[in-house]
Image (cartoon, grey):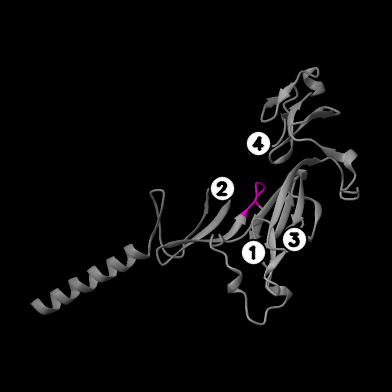
Amino acid sequence: MILLTFALRLFILCTLFTIVTSQCDDNGVIYASGDKWIRNNHFLVTCRNGKIQTLKCVTDSGHLLDVGSKTFVEQGYEYTCSREVNESLNTNSCPTFADFSDDIFKDRFAICCISRRFKGCVDVNGDIIKSGYFIIGNRSLKYCRIQPNQLQARIEPKGCFNGTINDDINDESLHIKKYAVWREGDIEYRCGDDGVHIQRCFPPELKNKPVWAGSAWIQDDGQVKTCGKIH
């Protein structure tokens, strides 16, 4: 009887230990293995064997992106969903018999695994630009410069692009210098570090009184209005 009681207690202790070690602690909130929740407003995660793993990324409007999916643009904002890459990325990790599908990427640089050289830069659509101007999120304009030996590369900031997908990206009349401010209709824009953003609004219902981006107001008819997108 004593041996049976001891064995039962040992079994209970082992079971409790397994449960505790398989749980996840996310800022003081305990989740059981298999639980799913939204973390930091932008990640659908789950608890697996005591570790928090990302399943999908979530945009501001709630759109789910698969991990490793192509760049996604929503209301002028660029989203990418990818796993963190080890900082010590090494071209020697490329397969011996590599092909074009084995390209590796880091910080918008594309590296060819066949030549072990820089191949180009990745734009907002996920396309590889070998050299020249390209756009990332919020119409932020960059220039991809690959050195002749292809062992060195640089992405240079070039302000913003005030054009459409049908316009020529090399048309310098559509290039806007960084920190420039301009107005189109009732909206005032600014070219900042992260591309084009709404800076102020001049709503007719407020008699064109300037309102800073991030502001909201309720009209006399009950409609709720906002200026810009709050992040």
Which quadrant would residue 190 be assigned to in this image? top right
Labels 4 & 2 near each other (Cβ < 8 A): no
Which residue does the image show at 14% across and 74% down from the upper left? 6
Which quadrant would residue 116 be assigned to in this image? bottom right
Crowding around mark 2 (Cα neighbors within 10 Å: few <14, some 14 to 19, many 20+) is few
Q: Give the range drawn in magenta.
A: 58-62
Q: Looking at the image, is 29 positioned above or below residue 117?
A: above
Assign a secondary structure to mark 3: strand
Q: The disc labelled 4 sits on which kind of residue?
A: Ile
Report the Cα–Cα distance between label 3 and label 1.
Answer: 19 Å
Assign a secondary structure to mark 1: loop
Assign a secondary structure to mark 2: loop
Q: Position of residue 63 (x, y in %)?
A: 67, 54
Q: Looking at the image, is 190 positioned above or below residue 96?
A: above
In the picture, the disc for residue 230 is 4
Q: Is the magenta stretch mostly helix, strand or loop?
A: loop
Q: Which of marks 3 and 4 is in front?
A: 3
In this rendering, position of residue 96 left or right of residue 142: left
Q: Mark 1 points at which residue?
A: 68
**Which circle's residue, 2 or 1, is located before the other in the chain?**
2
Q: Where is residue 177 in the image (x, y as percent from the top left)?
A: 79, 35
Answer whether residue 123 is visible to the viewer in this image: no
Asked whether 188 or 16 is in front, the reply is 188
Which quadrant would residue 110 be assigned to in this image? bottom right
**Which circle's residue, 4 or 2, is located before the other in the chain?**
2
**Which circle's residue, 3 or 1, is located before the other in the chain?**
1
Asked whether 98 or 72 is in front, the reply is 98
Q: Name the residue under label 2.
A: 41
In the picture, the disc for residue 120 is 3
Q: The disc labelled 3 sits on which kind of residue?
A: Gly
Q: Position of residue 27 (x, y in %)?
A: 41, 48
